[in-house]
Amino acid sequence: MFTTRVTQLFGIKHPIICGGMQWVSRAELVAAVANAGAIGFLTALTHDTPEALRDEIRKTRALTDKPIGVNVTLLPTARPVPYDAFFDAALTEGVDAIETSGRITEAQVARIKQGKAKHVHKVARVRDAITVQRMGVDAVSVVGQECGGHPSMEQIGTVVLGPRTVDAVSIPVIVGGGFGDGRGLAMALAMGAEGVLMGTRFMATRESLVHANIKAWMVEAKETDTAFIQASIRNPSRVMRNKRAEQVMEMEARGTTLEELLPLISGLNGRRALTEGEIDAGTVSCGQGVGFTHDVPTVRELVDRIVSDAERTIKRMGAMVK
């Protein structure tokens, strides 16, 4: 068992965080992560209304009495999003942690501080970690270019970005991007980080509601089976390399516009792929850590495996010191 400022901050047993994944981070998965001694985050934007988010929080609470969190992603959307109402729903329901990403304001940081939840903000650049520390967040997670979802345009890998962030801030740092086993947790701790952020690996667990077709694809996939898309519109995303992603890459290579791309990269198409198993229906966030996905265990089996493998790795490394 590892004790870090992150485990103490969230009141969890293991320094493992299952980041919020739209359409994926539902009550069943988040509760299973909590019961395994880690912490997971429901995603506010999976839900159409703050009231629906409240229902999902209560459903999660019925499945676990351990710490849980809510993710609120602050990015431009096609429709107005009641961000403040989502924050209020999460805080009044008494969640233990709030995970944010995107362009957060000082007023939003202050709003979160009014509740009991600990606040972690996700960034992809060192300078953004410095900024959110100044704004008063409790911890920062930083993701390298290997991550699924939205890495930085700068395309800096985790092995560089993690230690650079640790050196730049004094608050606890969580690192993500390319992690999927115990060696990764050991590496994160060796970087000076105090927790590891994973999303892709948790998609392929039994409690995840991701369709069996997607899970089967992940088990067979290699680290080369992801695609880096949307850089041409300055909204980079790492996704499954499926037919839809390849179509996007072809359009970007010859020159395209946001308007032309929108029908292909729509989140609703990605939702159809995840929930109905139509693998080529849309773009689906997926990190290079998919290369570590060789089976579909329970969440508890996965977490226990990661922790025990990390312990063995650190002991093996310690034996090298004479």
Image (spheres, grey):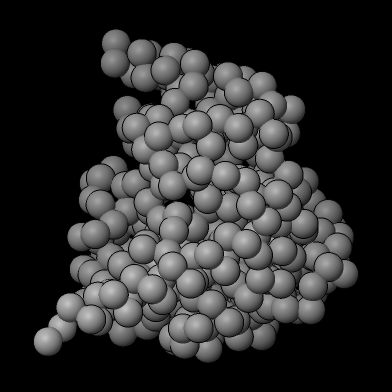
Residue located 40% across and 30% down the image: 225
Q: Position of residue 215 (x, y in %)?
A: 62, 37
Q: Is residue 193 visible?
A: no
Q: Position of residue 167 (x, y in %)?
A: 21, 77
Q: Quadrant of residue 139?
A: bottom left
Which image quadrant: the C terminus?
A: bottom left
Residue located 53% across and 50% down the image: 201
Residue located 44% across and 58% down the image: 181
Q: Is residue 263 above or below residue 152?
A: above
Question: Residue most toward the left?
Answer: 322
Judged left or right of residue 200, residue 196 is: left
Q: Is residue 283 visible?
A: yes
Q: Is residue 8 above or below residue 111?
A: below
Name the foreground residue: 16 vs 297.
Answer: 297
Question: In this figure, what is the number of numbered marks?
Answer: 0
Q: Is residue 294 above or below residue 121?
A: above
Q: Is residue 99 above or below residue 223?
A: below
Name the foreground residue: 53 vs 290.
Answer: 290
Judged left or right of residue 54, residue 139 is: left
Q: Position of residue 197 (x, y in %)?
A: 46, 62
Judged left or right of residue 45, residue 302 is: left
Residue located 29% across and 16% down the image: 253
Q: Quadrant of residue 133?
A: bottom left
Judged left or right of residue 80, residue 306 is: left
Name the foreground residue: 231 vs 96.
Answer: 96
Q: Quadrant of residue 114?
A: bottom right
Q: Position of residue 61 (x, y in %)?
A: 82, 71
Name the foreground residue: 228 vs 306.
Answer: 306
